[in-house]
Amino acid sequence: MAKRDYYEVLGVDKNSTEMEIKKAYRQMALKYHPDKNPDNKEAEDKFKEAAEAYDVLSNPDKKRKYDQFGHQGVGSQGFESGNVNMDDIFSHFGDIFGGQHPFESFFGGGGNQGGRRYVNKGSNIRIKVKVTLQEIATGVEKKIKINKLNACKECKGTGADKGSSFQTCKTCKGSGQIRRVTNTILGQMQTTSTCPTCNGEGQEIINRCKNCNGTGVEKGEEMLTFNIPPGVADGMQLSINGKGNAAEHGGIPGDLIIAIEEIEDPQLQRDGNNVLYELYISMADAALGCSLEIPTIDGKAKIKIDAGTQSGKMLRLKGKGLPPVNGYQKGDLMVNINIWTPQSLSHEEKAIMEKLKNSENFKPNPGKRDKGFFDRMRDIFS
């Protein structure tokens, strides 16, 4: 079954702001929430469909790729699978629900609504990684040391002292919730909130770990090795699951968010997947023709300059550009030829130029094949 357009799923358009997209998703999540629609497969599918749409449209990089290439540009997001755990969706979109179950944040529910136990998740870590044009062309493995919260070595992340154990929370009797019944003019109303004693975990530590004071985490560092795929661009973000800060009391670790920072190349300029190079040649080489070596991403290439070449001519070297992130066909190397005019001449050189300037061959006489600047730009971008 073909996927629906993500904008259609959330009921927004391409010009919608980040807040409008977030608001639309919250409304959809509440409307089709599984607890509100028990045993309703259609509602569950729409809930997952909305989560997939928001995952793409809330991410500037994914949204750009989706706008350009459609569903193929972002690949499968994985929320449509029938064995997806709903808690994973709630955890994934913590910025929407404040780290809670959607009914908790909207209706004051607790950490175990509908019998579910919501696991604490550690915070994400964001770092910047600099890459060169050559590394972008081939992909590169990076190794970096980061400061982070790790699981406590003494208690293995549990927060309990050696030899200690846990006991059922006396306040909530292990449910992780406190339920209260209030009499109103409409009858009795039951509200549920997270247990303040155990913070929704349903159990208490008998003796806290002295190293981490019962939190289960401690400050440390980790040497991480990861791969940057070919074709990335400045400002893109990559995510490595589970490599962020450890969560308290043995919860789920956060993610490592890697922001790509592209190092400017001294000779080559990037334009999407194409690479631009400004080549300056002398008037003599332009008139007589010549062969020259120019830099490319992976070394040097030899090109031929035809006799009578005009300034502004663009040469294209197919496949000498960068690969796309989600594709195989590389961009091109575009060589813009500029004819260098001498800025100072000797007496002998001036005499030669004076003699040549009256020659018919030195008088401008552009033909139909000699396109002007605007025509060349139109050809490039058409």
Image: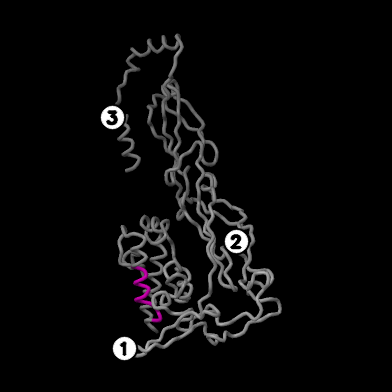
Seen at 38% across and 61% down, the residue is: 57
Amino acid type, residue under disc 2 in the picture:
Lys
Seen at 42% across and 11% down, the residue is: 350
Q: Position of residue 266 (x, y in %)?
A: 51, 37
Q: Which residue is mark 1?
A: 186
Amino acid type, residue under disc 1 in the picture:
Leu
Q: Quadrant of residue 114?
A: bottom left
Quadrant including the C terminus: top left
Looking at the image, residue 211 sits to the left or right of residue 138; the answer is right
Whole-angstrom CA distance, mark 1 to mark 2, is 51 Å
- Nearer the observer: mark 3 or 2; the answer is 2
Q: Residues within 10 Å of mark 2 (few under 14, many from 20)?
A: some
Colouring mode (rainbow / by chain / secondary structure / one colour): one colour
Q: Is residue 339 above or below residue 351?
A: below
Q: Which residue is mark 2?
A: 148
Looking at the image, residue 211 sits to the left or right of residue 58; the answer is right
- Earlier sequence position, callout 3 versus callout 2: 2
Q: Which residue is mark 3?
A: 368
